[in-house]
Amino acid sequence: MSRKTESSKTAAGSMSAAERAYSVIRGQILSGSHTPGTMLGEAALATEIGVSRTPVRVALARLQDEGWIHIYPKRGAIVQGIDERTVAELADARYVLETTAVERASEPMRQRLAEKLDSLITQHRAAFAEGDVARFIELTLEFHRGFVEAGDSRVMLEMYSLLSDRHRFTLFMNSRHLLDRSDDLITEHEALVKHLRSGDSAAFAATLQGHIAENAGPAR
């Protein structure tokens, strides 16, 4: 085997390890396993993930660029929270995208989506009954993304996808609040589907505004 081939395989392996480290650490941050203020060390992360420190270092640099951590040379990295302004801006952006898409949705699209969301609400109930907050959060992300899908706009979906990580993070940071409001949350989701099905975009917008305001909280 030539040195060039060996070098290429090594580079590919390093890239795979860096991607794996990034995926694991990012997932732990978004799920609340590493809460804001947690100090992350390269050596401990490398051991946990089963890679060398180099791919962990690459992953941490990428996460810092995305704003999830702040690296302190020779000390480690501290997980960052989301400040109140970002929480508010996230809520505003979600509101605009979801209400605009629903207002533009065709009648057939609204009816198809309503059927799908009814099924998700049934799954919401099951997740709460089992105390499975992680499952509920993933269902919630899918539920709200459905409203944007109704608008049949690739650009709006791309924009919404950019918000999903921060939306997931705030939900996990407020998981106790979600559990306390489980019955109310499901009732609000049912009301949103009712307004979607009837085509009452004004009522949908009013219900969504209250729903987002009630469930978005500080995620520092």
Image: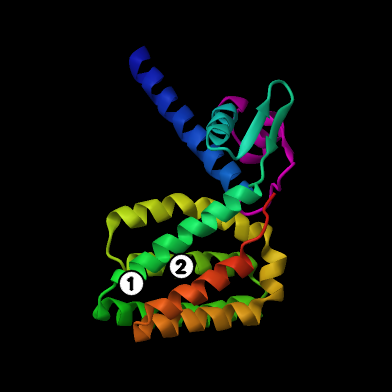
Residue 17 % position (x, y): 51, 34
Residue 160 % position (x, y): 41, 55
Where 97 sits versus 17, above or below?
below
Q: Nearer the viewer, residue 203 or 71?
A: 203
Mark 2 lies on a secondary structure that is helix
Q: Earlier in the sequence, mark 2 or mark 1?
A: 1
159 relative position to 187: left or right: left
Nearer to us of marks 2 and 1 is 1
Mark 1 lies on a secondary structure that is helix
Q: Residue at x 48, y 28 (%)?
A: 14
Q: What residue sits right under mark 1 in the picture?
A: 103
Q: CA distance from mark 2 to mark 1?
A: 14 Å
Badge 1 amino acid: Glu
Residue 79 % position (x, y): 68, 40
Where 46 sits versus 204, above or below?
above
185 relative position to 10: left or right: right
Residue 167 % position (x, y): 54, 56
Density class for disc 1 (Cα within 10 Å; few <14, some 14-19, many ≥20) is some
149 relative position to 96: left or right: left
Q: What residue sits right under mark 2 in the picture?
A: 144
Residue 162 visible in this rendered orientation of the protein: yes
The stretch in magenta equals 30-54
Badge 2 amino acid: His
Density class for disc 2 (Cα within 10 Å; few <14, some 14-19, many ≥20) is some
Q: Residue at x 70, y 68 (%)?
A: 177
